[in-house]
Amino acid sequence: MAWYEILALLIGTLVAFMALGVPVVFAFFATNLIGAYVFMGGDAGVLQLMRNSVDAVQSFALAPIPLFIFMGEVMFHTGVASRAIDAVDRLIARLPGRLALVAITGGTIFSALSGSTIANTAMLGSTLLPEMYRRGYHSSIAVGPIVAVGGLAMLIPPSALAVLLGSVAGIPIGELLVASILPALILAALFFGYVILRCSLSPHLAPSYDVAALSWRERLMPFVKYVLPLMAIFVVVVGSIIGGIATPTESAALGAAAAVAAAAAYRRLTWSSFRVALRQTLQFTVMTLFIICGSVSFSQIMAFTQASSGLSDLVTGSGLSPTLVLLGMLGILLFLGCFMDQVSMMMITAPLFMPVVQQFGFHLVWFGVLMLMLLEIGLATPPFGLLLFVAKGASPETSMREIIVSVAPFIALALCVVALLIVFPQITLLLPRLMGS
Amino acid sequence: MLIDVGARNLKLFAIPWSLETSEYMLYAMTFLGAPWVLRENGHIAIELAVERLPPRARARARLAADAVGAAVCAILFVYACRLLWRSYASGVIVQKSVVFPEWIEFSIVPPVMLLLCGIYLRRLLWPHLARPPAEP
């Protein structure tokens, strides 16, 4: 069989099982069983597949995933995060679209404490959406910012999915985590500016209301008390990576311990909230890591059958410019993001893209950040964007159509940032270079 | 891990087995947790196409998906047993910071695959006992 027939067979089988509703992990296992049996020597191939699955998650590099998720879940379920949002709420006074700005600022802060996009969106949705609707906010300015900023948890460290991407694509995890910070902050600033502009032009979208007159001390104190100490956790996590004191896994352990300590210090840590946080972390981690067990042989079958190198050679020999190839890969991610979850996208595209990335000499960390940006956008693209459903869960009265319409401008802004990062790679590479020096 | 970071940076001592222990725990947690997550309907599935089918076809598609899951887990159970037996018979020893026979590492997989298969079979045979699909 030619490499392209093998590639079509493997991808086709995988997509068919997924479309039938077979859980992603078992769709990968089924495809790999067929691929290993047919192309890797029958029984011996399947036994190798079993061995690969066992070895797949015995990796120190993957250990930050549960720890980063746990940080976010602890902050969310102990109520420490919503207190921080309240503090931000006091800080922002009479700006157009005030509550949407609180969502963006609070969401960005929470992203620096949580590796879970779901926890971020659910926390903002449950905390701020009811208040926004009570104040007469239009859905287009209420839901959009929450879904958009919810995805930032994927970019700003601690980010569980950045760790996963680094691990499966062979990108240095520490550098990838640090490189995503500036693009995420630019994105947050653009979201902030957009809300102010939109609400200034159309004030009916976010009717202004009287905010209780507070002194500067009353405004600042909750921020100092409930937000600044939490930012110390971010400094511990990122600082220990940049300073070379700890590996990403060790910094994640420090962060998780600091999150529990912070919740205890605020007297919010209860046995029930701790148990819920642990349970949610376990469920997400097992789901994610089991997909790695199921899919790890996919890339090996691709390599063994020369499907990935065949595709890479085809792209390299096609005479297409590197920019066009890059845009093609990002376009595929954008398309897949409409239908697929982020882990599956990574596991399918990384084995196909990384040989091409290396052939064209793209900077690994730069490409990794671009890929993360597209994966983040995929969280909000209809019809399957995960965060759209999380927002729907937090606000059942808002129709899915309204949610999609409200998110569209934010997706456009995120695509603008992707274009900016393509044109100016130094934005992405500034912090990793600082780390190297 | 925390003690290891602190002690290493203070140049007191290092805990060489902390890294390996984390790796084994990650592996054990993933496999042992997989049946629980399946029972809770927590394994992510793309139901976009299935949800658009008429009710009868949707029910059939779900049955087919469960049948695929049961078959995959049954095959993996057989191969996991064979891998375990091979490792036991060959007497391979894992020689890292912690030294132990390799078959111990593989012994988790067969019962996990059997449990996963059992959960799928229960869904197929007694669908009324299965939990409703989880919200995404």
Image (tube, rainbow, N blue to C red):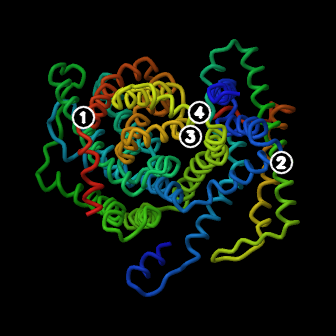
Which residue type does callout 1 highlight? Val
Label 4 residue SS: loop
The residues tagged by marks 1 and 4 sit, at their Cα atoms, a distance apart of 39 Å
Q: Is residue A67 left or right of residue A287?
A: left
Whichever of callouts 2 and 4 sits on the residue coming sooner in the sequence is 2
Q: Which residue in the protein does label 4 denote?
A: B135
Q: Which residue in the protein does label 2 denote?
A: B77
Label 2 residue SS: helix
The residues tagged by marks 2 and 4 sit, at their Cα atoms, a distance apart of 29 Å
State the mark number for residue A423: 1
The spot of residue A422 in percent (x, y) is: 29, 35
> Of the residues tagged 4 and 3, which is closer to the observer?
3
Q: Nearer the viewer, residue A418 or A189?
A: A418
The spot of residue B76 in percent (x, y) is: 80, 45
State the mark number for residue A347: 3
**Residue at 60% across / 64% down in the picture?**
B23
> Of the residues tagged 2 and 1, which is closer to the observer?
1
**Residue at 86% across / 54% down in the picture?**
B82
Which residue type does callout 3 highlight? Met
The spot of residue B99 in percent (x, y) is: 71, 77
The residues tagged by marks 3 and 1 sit, at their Cα atoms, a distance apart of 27 Å
